[in-house]
Image (cartoon, helix red, strand yellow):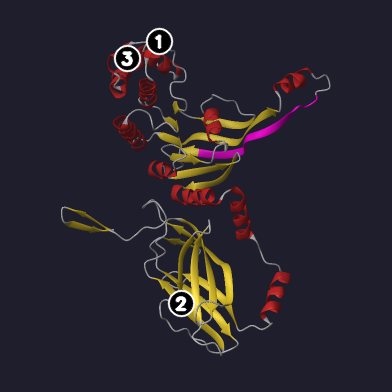
Amino acid sequence: MEAEKMIEIENLTKIYNLYEKPIDRLKESLSIGHKCYHKEHYALKDVSFTVNRGESIGIMGINGSGKSTILKIITGVLNPTSGKVVTHGKISALLELGAGFNPEYTGIENIYLNGTMMGYTKEEMKERVPSIVEFADIGDFINQPVKTYSSGMFARLAFAVSINVEPEILIVDEALSVGDIRFQLKCIEKMKQMMKGGTTVLFVSHDVNAIRRFCTRAIWLRHGVIEEDGDVNRISDKYLDFLKIGEEYYDEKKNEDTAVKTEEDKEQEEEKLAKNVIAEITSFKVMNSNNVEVSEVDINEPLNIEVTYNVYDENIKKPVVGIAVRGMDDDYVCGLNSLLDNHRVDWKKGENRITLRYTQGMLAIGGKYYFDVALYDETATVPIQYISVVKKIAVYSGYKGEGRYIIPHVWENGGNNEQI
């Protein structure tokens, strides 16, 4: 059975005209020759995606990526320059809390006003008022003009109205920090109930872990276009890698992933190896426990790192093999070598092979990592051959913890041990 579509966005584009000076706008409007004084800025460019009923989608991206713009277009606050947005069902939006409230009206009057704006009749809102008043929990101020409210009371009422009108689509933009801790917990619990009840949710936040907790799918916007769309943990890992290393370096790394060596490059490498080569690494494989080569692994999946190397000069005493793992931001995650582990390496003329086993998996939080591999002298000081970024691998951890590693651990509760 085909899923019911609640939001359909097709080739959505939003362009703002940017002027260097305010007077340029007037000059342009009065120009007989239609001279252009502005530059076009694409807040969104040819964005397309659909949201099905009951989906909880997190939208992430740095400031200026188009997150708030797309929500405002969906809710009708902004008009697109081109493209199409179709929504099915009542929408409640937590964009700017209290937008549309009349400061001269009382809290109760504003509840009815907002209900009318959403298309509810007075009788329908009358049924909802008690639950909204109870949720806001601002006491007798509910009968006072909202211009007398503190900012906290104003936000509580606005949140209570938006979240208690039984919307089919709920849109939340960085609005979960209103009120005290008890009210925040109440808001979060209410959102969870709505999600379980089938409410479709679009959630924008700079807190990636909050998106992991609430959503199953994520959309990463970058410069007004969709960079990634998919499983929330996979997209979150890629986005966090991007935040660690920055825009320019991220693009460089991405280009490296897709780069293909030409035949000329390969010939040059072969020529270099033919000159005074003591040994050369010919193969580096990352394999699972079934010895199948992989480029994506689960955090706890045991791995076999297989290095094949050709020896041309046997006169190296106690050679050392080293393997290092680094993050996309070049953070040195783990470096192991045969010298430190007191393992004797085979060094016979011709082809040799050695395997390093990660018996409990990478144990590193989800993201992309790369391997360096090297052949050293017996002190692990002089590199016979060192290859940087010999292999890249994506680790998927789900949302099991935060930081860089998941340390094997045990929780104890009244003496009952639970192994994690």
Query: What secondary structure prevails in the magenta region?
Result: strand
Q: Which secondary structure lies at badge 3? A: helix
Q: Position of residue 160 (x, y in %)?
A: 35, 24
The residue shown at (52%, 31%) is 71
Q: Which residue is mark 2?
A: 355
State which quarter of the image contains the N terminus.
top left
Check the image and report above or below for 412 versus 375.
Answer: above
Q: Are marks 1 and 2 in contact (CB under 8 Å)?
A: no
* Label 2 or label 3, whichever comes before in sequence order: 3
Q: Are marks 2 and 3 in contact (CB under 8 Å)?
A: no
Check the image and report above or below for 7 versus 78.
Answer: below
Q: Residues within 10 Å of mark 2 (few under 14, many from 20)?
A: some
Q: Which residue type does callout 1 highlight?
A: Tyr
Q: Are marks 3 and 1 in contact (CB under 8 Å)?
A: no
Q: Position of residue 255 (x, y in %)?
A: 63, 56
Which one is nearer the viewer's eye here, 83 or 323? 323
Q: Residues within 10 Å of mark 3 (few under 14, many from 20)?
A: many
Residue 41 lies within the magenta run: yes
The residue shown at (65%, 31%) is 15
Q: Which secondary structure lies at badge 2? A: strand
Q: Which residue is mark 3?
A: 142
Q: Residues within 10 Å of mark 1 (few under 14, many from 20)?
A: some
Q: Which residue type does callout 2 highlight?
A: Thr
Q: Position of residue 258 (x, y in %)?
A: 62, 59
Instruction: State which region is magenta.
Output: 35-50
Which one is nearer the viewer's eye here, 338 or 45? 338
Numbered label tally: 3
User: Is residue 293 in view from this perspective?
Assistant: no
Q: Which residue is mark 1?
A: 105
